[in-house]
Amino acid sequence: MVTSLLAKLGRAEESARQECAELARQMEQLHERMAVARRRLERLSIAREELTALEADGEPVGPEAGKPAGSGQDGRGSGSETAGQAEVHQERPVLRGLRKDAVVLLASSEEPLRARDVVRALGQRDVRGQVEGMRARLKRLVADGWLIEREQGLFAVASGVNGFAGEGGAATS
């Protein structure tokens, strides 16, 4: 009788082991599918953000983007932030997704961060593609006036931004 119970227990254990192996295989497949879906979502999000920004201003991106015609004729130096530039920054593009998360993170950081640090802090995989995507996103946030690049590769929140509003506005000092 004990041997038949041990045999039944052995079969039940083997069945449970096979079920665990099958579930582990299914989980691995789901992880792979999730990684593919996340990469696609990331690409689509970046594309949407870029198209939204291009549609919103209809102007080339760069130091003069967003400035009204003739704004450079007042004799102010372009290297420092002036009252005219602060007005431009109040009309920053709407932030969503990882762009918003990055600005919030950098606004709460006591020191500038590199793209790799931002990727890690946001819980993303520390792989070249993610880091390069974040670097491009941070550079765009610099062009949009949300961030500054203190030195090459070190990003911080732009001066004049002391609060954060997710719909594109920012409280200024």
Image: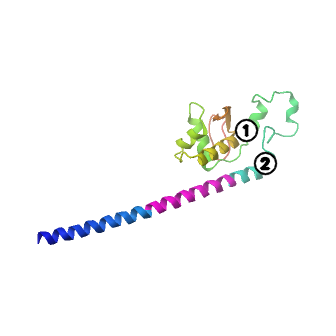
User: Quadrant of the rendered structure where residue 117 is?
Assistant: top right
Task: Residue at 80%, 30% (x, y): give it.
Answer: 78
- Nearest the camera: 70 or 156? 156
| Marks 2 and 1, how far apart at CA | 13 Å
- Secondary element at image label 2: helix
The spot of residue 134 in percent (x, y) is: 62, 45
Question: What's the residue type where badge 1 is placed?
Answer: His
The way the protein has been coloured in the rendering is rainbow
Residue that label 2 marks: 57
Side of 111 relative to 94 (left or right): left
Task: Residue at 44%, 61% (x, y): give it.
Answer: 27
Task: Residue at 51%, 59% (x, y): give it.
Answer: 32
The spot of residue 42 in percent (x, y) is: 61, 53
Q: Is residue 172 visible?
A: no
Residue that label 1 marks: 89
Mark 1 residue crowding within 10 angstroms, few (<14) / some (14–19) / many (20+): many
- Nearest the camera: 105 or 123? 123
Mark drawn on residue 173: none
Q: Is residue 11 above or below residue 173?
A: below
Q: Quarter of the image containing the N terminus?
A: bottom left
- Nearest the camera: 3 or 36? 3
Please give the range of residues in magenta.
27-47
Question: What's the residue type where badge 2 is placed?
Answer: Asp
33 part of magenta stretch = yes
Q: Quarter of the image containing the C terminus?
A: top right
Q: Is residue 101 visible?
A: yes
39 part of magenta stretch = yes
Side of 29 relative to 140 (left or right): left
